[in-house]
Image (cartoon, rainbow, N blue to C red):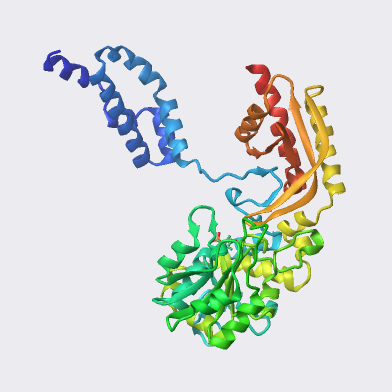
Amino acid sequence: MDAKNEQDRLKELPKIDVLLRLPSVETLTEVHGRSRVALALREMVDELRAQLRENPQAVQELEKWRAGLTESLRVRLESDLESALLPVVNATGVLVHTNLGRAPLSDEAIRRMAEMAATYTSLEYDLAAGRRGSRSLHAQRLLARLFPGAAAHVVNNNAAAVLLALNTLAEGKEVLVSRGELVEIGGSFRIPDVMRKGQAVLREVGTTNRTRLSDYEEAITPATALLLKVHTSNYRIIGFTMQASLSDLVMLGKRRGLPVMVDQGSGNLRDLSRKGIDGEPSVQDLLAHGADLVTFSGDKLLGGPQAGILVGRPDLVDRIRRNPLSRALRVDKITYAALEATLSSYLTGRAATEIPVLRMLEETTDSIGRRARRCATALESAAPGSFRLEVIPGASLVGGGAAPMAEIPTSLLAVALEGMSTQEMERALRRARPPVIARIQDERLVLDLRTVSEDLESALVAALAGIVGRRIRR
Ligand SMILES: *Cc1c(COP(=O)(O)O)cnc(C)c1O
């Protein structure tokens, strides 16, 4: 192939400024802006040039390329803007589903977030004094009411809370942790790693299944700065086991002048044992048992926005607040707005009805069963005779690494469709808009309405009805 020929062929490539003047391209320019359109066109022409170099025959395709230009350009520009963040219908029955963004917020939290997002605020302004104030006052008053006598500080998430506490209280010093509590939560949060990043030295005590108070006691040296208890939130060690109780640790801490910190995780503020959920102590409970510092998430069982909350001894919290790392881990006005609204629901005693996660937890099996049958009826009229539908007993999960063993009784809608496998149905539901995330149990597709609010039932039914069409078209 001679160079001259190639030159000729490449000369046929369309010029960007000519393309930009095409009326159909000009229409796109109005929507997407001239520079984005020019950039996309340049990419497309570059790709075309590469194709022509590779395969001279492709010059025949140039007309087709021109004909499809506007459409490919539009698709390219729009897919650039498409968010990967979509609302989904959580039909898994996992209340605090970390992959699905954990807790949906209360109406009041949403209203306050929108209000504060739209305007300037008193975030760091002292209105009485007319000068710079402190953003950490927000939520502090509410937290002080919820945890009398304790001070509080809010950061980005619980991992940040633990990191900040370790760095403040134990930088360059040793922290004692039971070998049974060296937790990993969701891959990236591992106690030994957070310890290292917090510049604290992990000192493991006891064994995986048994750690006695004397194991802690014997490990204490002048280098020890903190006794840490980590809530084993996503697993249980069962069988021949023993862990020193918090009260015992607190006694030891007092005797040796060492603070005791508990990474509680879930942010549960209520007695869950009446819901059959054991081993999820409330934050208040831990403080009442003498914990000097407790850390937890805002978006797990607390039911609020992503945040990490530290509560405890005012002198410790004050040191934590003054750590320069605090600045890097701080939260914005929108988080404060949502967190304050969430905490208010606890103070007014309306948490169980106002906070979605708690409302879902409280819904009875009967009520969920009724809603499942209602969906079945709607589905039957949307796609008569297509599905085999059955409402069966099952279990919902707390999730989010809390109460791993607790199964909350629920009613499941089991769905079968002639000519489509369970896996195919599950996949098709994920492709619906909004996507529906279902569960497969004993080879059956099941939907747990506990985590589907009433206003999303129609979307659920529409997604299911939609997969019938998909099956027929195939
Ligand atoms: C969830 C959890 C964390 C991590 O909290 P994030 O808010 O996800 O950062 C840490 N410790 C425990 C015990 C947890 O349950």
With respect to residue 350, does 68 lie above or below? above
Give the image location of residue 147, x and y in percent: 67, 79
With respect to residue 208, does 324 lie above or below? below
Q: Residue at x 43, y 84 (%)?
A: 222
Can I make out residue 119 in this image? no
Q: Is residue 282 left or right of residue 320?
A: right
In the image, ligand 1 is in what quadrant? bottom right
Of 31 and 250, nearer the camera is 250
Give the image location of residue 318, x and y in percent: 51, 83
Q: Is residue 7 left or right of residue 288?
A: left
Give the image location of residue 230, x and y in percent: 58, 67
Q: Is residue 207 left or right of residue 8?
A: right
With respect to residue 100, does 382 lie above or below? above
Location of residue 328 (image quadrant): bottom left
Q: Is residue 309 left or right of residue 358?
A: left
Q: Residue at x 46, y 41 (%)?
A: 81
Of 280 and 306, nearer the camera is 280
Q: Residue at x 32, y 17 (%)?
A: 62
Give the image location of residue 317, x and y in percent: 53, 80
Can I make out residue 279 in this image? yes
Q: Which quarter of the figure is the N terminus placed in?
A: top left
Q: Which quarter of the figure is the C terminus placed in?
A: top right
Location of residue 384 (image quadrant): top right
Of 87 and 10, nearer the camera is 87
Total marks placed: 0
Q: Residue at x 42, y 72 (%)?
A: 200
